Amino acid sequence: MKKIDVVTLGCSKNLVDSESLIKQFEAGGFSVAHDAETPKGDIAIINTCGFIGDAKEESIETILNFAEAKKRGDLKKLFVMGCLSERYSKQLKEELPEVDAIYGKFDWKKIVEDLGQNYRADLINERSLTTPGHYAYFKISEGCNRSCSYCAIPLITGKHQSKPMEQLIDEAEGLAAQGVKELQVIAQDLSFYGLDIYKQMKLAELTHKIADVKGIDWVRLHYAYPAGFPYNLLKVMNEHPNVCNYIDIALQHISDPMLKIMRRNVSKAETYKLIERMRNDVPGIHLRTTMITGHPGETEQDFKEMLDFVKEMRFERLGVFPYSHEEDTHAFRNYKDDIPQEVKQERADAIMEVQEQISWEINQEKVGSEMKVIVDRKEEDYYVARTEFDSPEVDPEVLIPVDGNEAKVGEFCQVKITDAESYDLFGAVVK
């Protein structure tokens, strides 16, 4: 039996791709390890990220580490795929001769066939999950039709392509049959789901149908856009208790001059109206968003406006990216990257300092309340769990002491929140 290492870098959308590829290999009789720090097999496949500078550096560093393993004789073949190789295939071939083959983001069939097996089209809805068995990422579309100034993703993934609704429902039912209780619904742009194949946005209808799948206890939505947000989704969130009162919606900025430069197709006033509507229509909703600091053209006044916005809106979840000047984007072609990196980082740090206090205050309000959680893992002296308001890996966790509490990994339980820090809660199982 041949052994393959698959290493996944970047976002959860990449992880879904890796899981589909692993299923193909396992169906062909391969033994596959995922995200091993050192090679365990004959062949390594690095599924790269090419989103921003830091992600590209991590991808290159990982490739070089595995290339060294190949030189030592610990590895026979090294393949590279994913977003970085989709974007920089020619450069990688010239600069990394140690790599045996370089594939694009969507060349799964060629990878499988180059390793001597037939690509199984009948496995289109099947994956070998690398997440804990009780949750799975659930990708509903590829690509993006937006034209944000800073973003290279449409250059890599192409135009938005929705998966047919019937295929997605079959996939959800299959995952539920495997024991998956929680679906993390992902796409580069959730809001546009269905527009290409049904000629209208169908995210609300899809969410309704997924929520009706027996065995799915939580459905969580990631990566919506403010421009053209499908407001009928909010009704579905209220109608279905298993659709989490949580949405990940990237706002990126708030000043009108910056929103225009960044080509976000939304105004400050429209953004305020959107947030107000979300919080009014879905009481208790937790909003996750991201901001970008240091985009070309951002003045101190623009930054102050964004900082004041974060203070006023008190987002439950928030992250910040210092701007990365990406080749071939609109911003790269039309603007000079004239804000020093240290200023970009200082602005990001200032926002996160404000957000840390906001997060602490929001968490303090939860002390004494009872909440439903799912237990992800046992780690030293704690069970590590999440509420409906928390996505894996990026959001706060609920730490439950093993001593004195009975909980089971992969199962739900009720906890009473006993204490809180800025980004974590502590709880005890309610008996």
Image: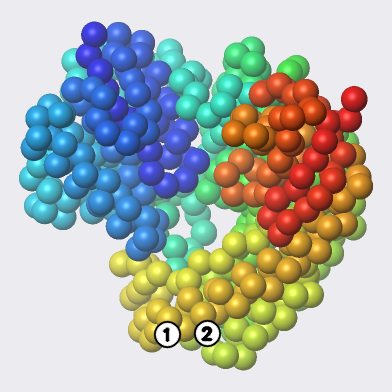
For image coordinates 35% across by 67% down, the residue present is: 326
Q: CA distance from mark 1 to mark 2?
A: 8 Å
Q: Position of residue 266 (x, y in %)?
A: 65, 70
Q: Position of residue 185 (x, y in %)?
A: 62, 37
Amino acid at dot 1: Ile
Q: Position of residue 150 (x, y in %)?
A: 44, 68
Which badge, 1 or 2, comes first in the chain's sequence? 2
**Mark 2, other Cα within 10 Å: few <14 / some 14–19 / many ≥20:** some
Q: Are marks 1 and 2 in contact (CB under 8 Å)?
A: yes
Identify the coloring.
rainbow
**Mark 1, other Cα within 10 Å: few <14 / some 14–19 / many ≥20:** some
Asked whether 236 or 95 is in front, the reply is 95
SS category of the residue bearing label 1: loop
In the rendered image, the vertical position of residue 269 relative to residue 1, given as above or below: below
Residue with the mark numbered 2: 298
In this image, 60 relative to 294: left or right? left
**Which quarter of the image is occupied by the N terminus?**
top left
Residue with the mark numbered 1: 339
**Mark 1 or mark 2, whichever is nearer to me:** 1
Amino acid at dot 2: Glu
User: Is residue 265 at all visible to an observer of this figure?
Assistant: no
Asked whether 188 or 346 is in front, the reply is 346
SS category of the residue bearing label 2: loop
